[in-house]
């Protein structure tokens, strides 16, 4: 016997039965985001490693530990994308989009890759829905992004999610804050985890969202970034809150929302779900403003704001909600004898062309086994075709849930079925 080959750890198959939930989320997203004027962008799964080193940041866990990096046959260092913002920015710059329009609204969906420790809702191939808005530095653009996520969660029926917002300041005020933060952290340096000892020197803000318990205690006593904002940053953040209020979007101001990436400036936000199925992976998405990123990647000086949502986690929550997705089988056509197999097969195809979801057992077999199959696929109606039905051109349309069968002329089956399904 041949050795069985299994899938790669942390990379999941999504089979029919589950995929309907995914399709529902994807369809809902596409419909809703188009209402906001966002166009879908599709970038490759693989990028030049330097793109992520320069944008996400060398000292982040993502670039430092979690990237799938490899050399191709031409000796280039390539990486599977660990996130979607940097590839979108790369495409935005490469196609000179800024020259064609002052404001650009893009969204994307697809798999991302990080070599992470696995937990519920956290996988090595994970899926994200993200959006980016380029060209506006105004608070309205930040709030439009948050509104879009809020509307999506509402449409999906996920109401138990809270929006947390923060501001990380900018070049004018963050350095002074960082100095005060480092002073506080230095006093506790020996108690920090080994990762944070390094962060303390290279990127002290990241200590604030370390998951280590002792680090969190030290962080909770650290100076509050919101008290260090300069006047323009303070005004920007106040306006974000005023606009959220105007849209009646509930939120919590949380000075610990750092996001795990180096490129954020000013507004950052996270959507946190309180559901046991997610365990510690309770953040379903988040984002923020990154006014310097496009320029730092060699593009024009264009401000931007974006977010990413974890599709895996959204689907987990949606499955828990007990909603049903996917379309039921309208009709199962069974054949009573081998001589009717051709007629059954042809009738099935004809009805599918009319837009019905019809199932037919291509293996034939006993009527009993076919009816079992009809039950298994959850068909709403069944129709048995035998010699008598073929001769008379009449058959019985039977509701699987019970009740008297309806006599139907085979040449009028489509109309009768349509009416019967409407009544169903
Ligand atoms: Zn730590
Ligand atoms: Zn500032």
Image (cartoon, grey):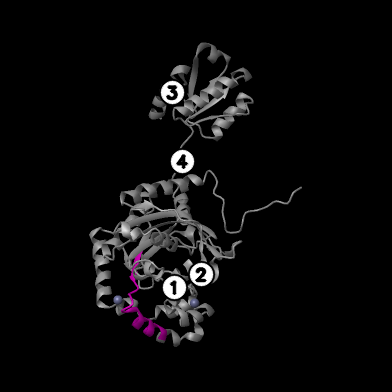
Q: Say which element carries label 3.
A: helix
On screen, residue 23 above or below 87: above
Give the spatial CA distance, label 3 vs label 4.
22 Å
Q: Say which element carries label 4.
A: loop
Q: Do the residues labelled 3 and 1 touch (CB within 8 Å)?
A: no
Quadrant housing residue 339: top right
Which image quarter is the C terminus in?
Answer: top left
Q: Which residue is drawn at 45% across and 46% down?
A: 23
Viewer-side label of 2, 3: 2
Residues in magenta, as a range: 163-182
Label placed on residue 63: 2
Of callouts 4 and 1, which one flags the residue occurring earlier in the amino acid sequence? 1
Q: Name the residue under label 1.
A: 209
Residue 319 visible in the snapshot: yes
The image shows a total of numbered marks equal to: 4
Magenta span has 392?
Answer: no
Of callouts 3 and 1, which one flags the residue occurring earlier in the amino acid sequence? 1
């Amino acid at each position: 016997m041949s050795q069985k080959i299994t899938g790669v750890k942390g990379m999941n198959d999504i089979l029919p039965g589950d995929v309907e939930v995914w399709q529902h989320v994807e369809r809902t997203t596409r419909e809703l985001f188009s209402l906001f004027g966002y166009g879908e962008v599709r970038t490759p799964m693989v990028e030049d490693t330097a793109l992520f080193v320069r944008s996400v940041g060398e000292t982040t866990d993502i670039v430092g530990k979690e990237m799938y990096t490899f050399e191709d046959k031409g000796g280039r260092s390539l990486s599977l994308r660990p996130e979607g913002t940097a590839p979108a920015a790369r495409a935005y710059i490469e196609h000179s989009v800024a020259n064609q329009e002052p404001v650009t609204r893009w969204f994307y969906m697809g798999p991302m890759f990080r070599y992470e420790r696995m937990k519920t809702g956290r996988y090595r191939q994970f899926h994200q829905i993200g959006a980016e808005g380029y060209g506006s530095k105004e608070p309205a653009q930040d709030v439009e992004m948050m509104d879009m996520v809020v509307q999506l969660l509402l449409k999906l029926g996920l109401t138990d999610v809270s929006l947390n917002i923060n501001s990380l300041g900018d070049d004018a005020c963050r350095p002074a804050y960082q100095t005060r933060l480092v002073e506080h952290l230095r006093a506790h340096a020996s108690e920090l985890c080994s990762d944070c000892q390094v962060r303390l020197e290279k990127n002290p803000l990241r200590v604030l969202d370390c998951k280590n318990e002792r680090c969190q205690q030290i962080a909770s006593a650290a100076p509050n970034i919101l008290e260090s904002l300069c006047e323009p940053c303070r005004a920007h953040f106040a306006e974000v809150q005023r606009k959220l209020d105007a849209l009646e979007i509930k939120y919590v101001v949380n000075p610990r929302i750092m996001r795990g990436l180096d490129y954020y400036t000013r507004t950052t936000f996270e959507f946190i779900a309180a559901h046991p199925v997610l365990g510690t992976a309770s953040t379903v998405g988040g984002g923020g403003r990154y006014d310097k990123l496009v320029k730092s990647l060699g593009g024009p000086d264009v401000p931007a704001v974006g977010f990413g949502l974890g599709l895996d986690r959204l689907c987990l929550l949606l499955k828990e909600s007990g909603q049903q997705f996917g379309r039921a089988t309208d009709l199962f056509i069974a054949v009573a004898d081998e001589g009717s197999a051709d007629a059954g097969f042809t009738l099935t195809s004809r009805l599918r062309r009319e837009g019905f979801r019809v199932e037919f057992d291509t293996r034939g077999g006993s009527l009993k086994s076919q009816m079992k199959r009809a039950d298994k696929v959850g068909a709403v109606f069944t129709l048995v075709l035998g010699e008598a039905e073929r001769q008379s051109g009449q058959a019985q349309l039977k509701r699987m849930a019970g009740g008297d069968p309806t006599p139907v002329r085979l040449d009028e089956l489509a109309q009768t079925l349509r009416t019967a399904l409407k009544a169903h």
